[in-house]
Image (spheres, grey):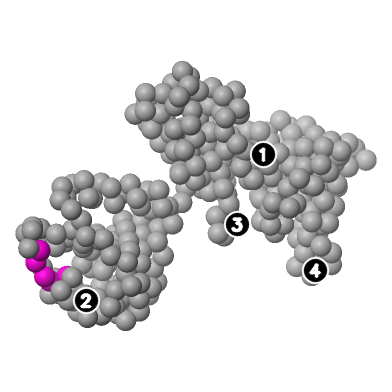
């Protein structure tokens, strides 16, 4: 039996591995694929254990070992039926001969990171975990906890970090009840949430507060990622302003987090279509200027947000 566990969601991958090892009931054998030598693989996949007839062999990162990875298809044909081989590959080239062979011979379980579109799934998961831990957690607290579990992926996209959410639940579990107030008190804001606050401050027309927020965030964040997040909020604002349906339906249509979109909804109602066009244009011009390196990225970000302030204040 062969199982391939893949994807960037390390939390879900570790949970899947825990389930496989629990079902096995014995002592699994763990190997670092990058360190394995080709001569070790035949015995690893065909040999029997002195202590148990059945074996669970877990190999992490074998795809990084090209020689061993390329030799795997031939070895799989001779693999003992008493062995359950589990390959853990967060990232794997699906064009390789070995992966194509595994598609035919293995069960492939893919665990992707949760994005904004998966916020409802994340909320259900948090509620289930809280129930399992015997916690009282209201719906508003769940939404805020998820919001404070957003981090930037390696690609610069906001994703829900389940490790962060689980640690937050464990931290709150000592309290009699978790409310939005206790979440705010005990669970730190993440940089992504701070970036969201920057755009909201601009939409309120608070130039002084905006300048201070940018000053605080500049040493901590990469400007192009910040600009990408801000641009995403501009898109959400434009979608809200152009639509007559509730914010949760807009969020579903564009694949955004309902909580984040709902916070932008009051601003979208106050702004005219012309106002939103000016804001979109400001970020379009900033994007073009960044690509041409006309000025430093933080300068261009502040200029774009300043235009948002001017638009909101009617100047």
User: Magenta segment, which residues?
Assistant: 45-49
Q: Which residue is mark 3?
A: 156
Q: Which of the two residues, 117 or 138, is positioned nearer the viewer here?
A: 138
The quarter of the picture where the C terminus appears is top right
Q: Earlier in the sequence, mark 1 or mark 2?
A: 2
Q: CB of mark 2 within 8 Å of CB of mark 4?
A: no
Q: Earlier in the sequence, mark 4 or mark 3?
A: 3
Image height of 187 relative to 55, above or below = above
Question: Mark 1 against mark 3, which lies toward the viewer?
Answer: 3
Judged left or right of residue 170, residue 206 is: right
Image quarter of residue 199 = top right
Q: Secondary structure at mark 1?
A: helix
Q: Residues under labels 2 and 4: Cα distance? A: 52 Å
Q: Nearer the viewer, residue 229 or 175?
A: 175
User: Which residue is at a point 37% across and 28% down the rendered structure image?
Assistant: 133
Tag 4, which secondary structure? loop
**Residue 4 visible in the picture:** yes
Q: CA distance from mark 3 to mark 2?
A: 39 Å
Q: Which residue position is annotated with label 4? A: 293
> Which numbered disc flags the more N-terminal residue, 4 or 1?
1
Please tell me whether mark 3 or mark 2 is closer to you in this view: 2
Crowding at dot 4, Cα within 10 Å, few <14 / some 14-19 / many 20+, comes out as few
Q: Nearer the viewer, mark 1 or mark 2?
A: 2
Provide residue 91's location: percent of width, then percent of height. Answer: 41, 65
Q: Residues within 10 Å of mark 2 (few under 14, many from 20)?
A: few
- Structural crowding at the residue carrying mark 3, measured as other residues with C-alpha within 10 Å and reported as few (<14), some (14–19) or many (≥20): some
Find the distance from the CA under tag 1 to the CA under tag 3. 23 Å
Residue at numbered disc 1: 240
**218 vs 223, nearest the viewer:** 218
Lower position in the chain sequence, tag 1 or tag 3: 3
């Amino acid at each position: 039996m062969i199982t391939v566990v893949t994807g960037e969601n390390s939390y879900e991958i570790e949970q899947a591995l825990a389930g496989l090892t629990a079902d096995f009931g014995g002592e699994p054998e763990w190997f670092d694929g990058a360190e394995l030598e080709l001569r070790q693989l035949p015995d690893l996949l065909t040999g029997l254990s002195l202590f148990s007839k059945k074996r669970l062999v877990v190999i992490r990162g074998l795809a990084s070992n090209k020689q061993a990875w390329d030799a795997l298809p031939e070895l799989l044909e001779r693999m003992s039926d008493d062995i359950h081989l589990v390959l853990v590959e967060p990232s794997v080239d699906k064009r390789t001969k070995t992966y194509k062979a595994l598609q035919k011979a293995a069960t492939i379980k893919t665990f992707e990171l949760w994005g904004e579109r998966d916020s409802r799934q994340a909320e259900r998961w948090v509620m289930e975990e809280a129930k399992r831990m015997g916690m009282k957690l209201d719906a508003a607290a769940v939404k805020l906890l998820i919001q404070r579990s957003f981090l930037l992926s390696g690609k610069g996209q906001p994703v829900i970090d389940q490790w962060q959410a689980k640690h937050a639940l464990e931290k709150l579990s000592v309290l009699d009840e978790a409310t939005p107030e206790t979440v705010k008190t005990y669970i730190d804001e993440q940089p992504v949430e701070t970036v969201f606050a920057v755009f909201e401050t601009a939409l309120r027309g608070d130039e002084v507060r905006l300048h201070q927020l940018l000053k605080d965030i500049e040493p901590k964040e990469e400007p192009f990622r910040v600009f990408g997040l801000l641009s995403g909020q501009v898109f959400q604002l434009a979608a809200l302003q152009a639509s007559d349906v509730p914010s949760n339906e807009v969020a579903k249509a564009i694949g955004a987090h309902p909580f984040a979109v709902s916070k932008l909804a009051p601003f979208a109602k106050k702004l005219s279509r012309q106002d939103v066009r000016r804001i979109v244009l400001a970020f379009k011009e900033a994007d073009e200027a960044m690509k041409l390196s006309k000025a430093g990225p933080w300068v261009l970000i502040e200029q774009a947000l300043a235009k948002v302030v001017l638009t909101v204040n009617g100047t």
